[in-house]
Amino acid sequence: MSERLERVEAILEVLAQQTLATAQATARNTEAIERLFAATAQNAEAIGQAFAAIGQNAEAIGRVSTVTVQNTEAIERLFAVIAQNTEAIGQVFAAIAQTRESIAELRASIAELRQVVEQQNRAINYLLSQD
């Protein structure tokens, strides 16, 4: 009976270790997902800024074509909006890179979790085979 109790205790220990490893991997996954959502939100914001800048471009172009007296001022505003557009596009690319990093981290966490689960399963199988 004592050997059986020791095996049960060993199995419970393995399960406790597996649960801890799973919780740690889940925490890392959660952090990676949070970073992914943050990067996605930045993407959305940068895209919104890009569309706003495009709208400003359209306004500036309309003013240039209808008010020839203000031609020089409208061109200056157009260049300012183009600079904003370029910055917004840069932010989109940075957010995309951040998204890719988050995805890579998430994949690494999943791979670690799989390794831990496989190790724990091998340990459990070994302990169960010790009849």
Image: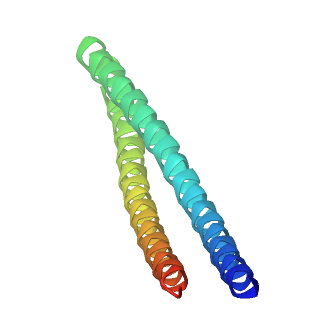
Q: Residue at x 46, y 61 (%)?
A: 102
In-front residue for pair 89/31 = 31
Q: In the picture shown, does residue 18 fall above or below 34?
A: below
Q: In the picture shown, does residue 7 fall above or below 38?
A: below
Q: Residue at x 37, y 42 (%)?
A: 85
Q: Position of residue 80 (x, y in %)?
A: 41, 41
Residue extending furthest toward the top: 66
Residue extending furthest toward the left: 65
Q: Residue at x 45, y 37 (%)?
A: 44
Question: Would you identify the image quadrant in which residue 29 lies?
Answer: bottom right
Q: Position of residue 25 (x, y in %)?
A: 57, 67
Question: Would you identify the image quadrant in which residue 104 lies?
Answer: bottom left
Q: Position of residue 76 (x, y in %)?
A: 37, 37
In-front residue for pair 87/79 = 87
Q: Residue at x 42, y 28 (%)?
A: 52
Q: Position of residue 63 (x, y in %)?
A: 32, 17
In-front residue for pair 124/41 = 124
Question: Would you identify the image quadrant in which residue 71 lies?
Answer: top left
Q: How is the image coloured?
A: rainbow
Q: In the picture shown, does residue 119 fall above or below 56?
A: below
For the image shown, how many numbered marks are present on the structure? 0
In-front residue for pair 101/20 = 20
Which quadrant of the rendered structure holds the N terminus?
Answer: bottom right
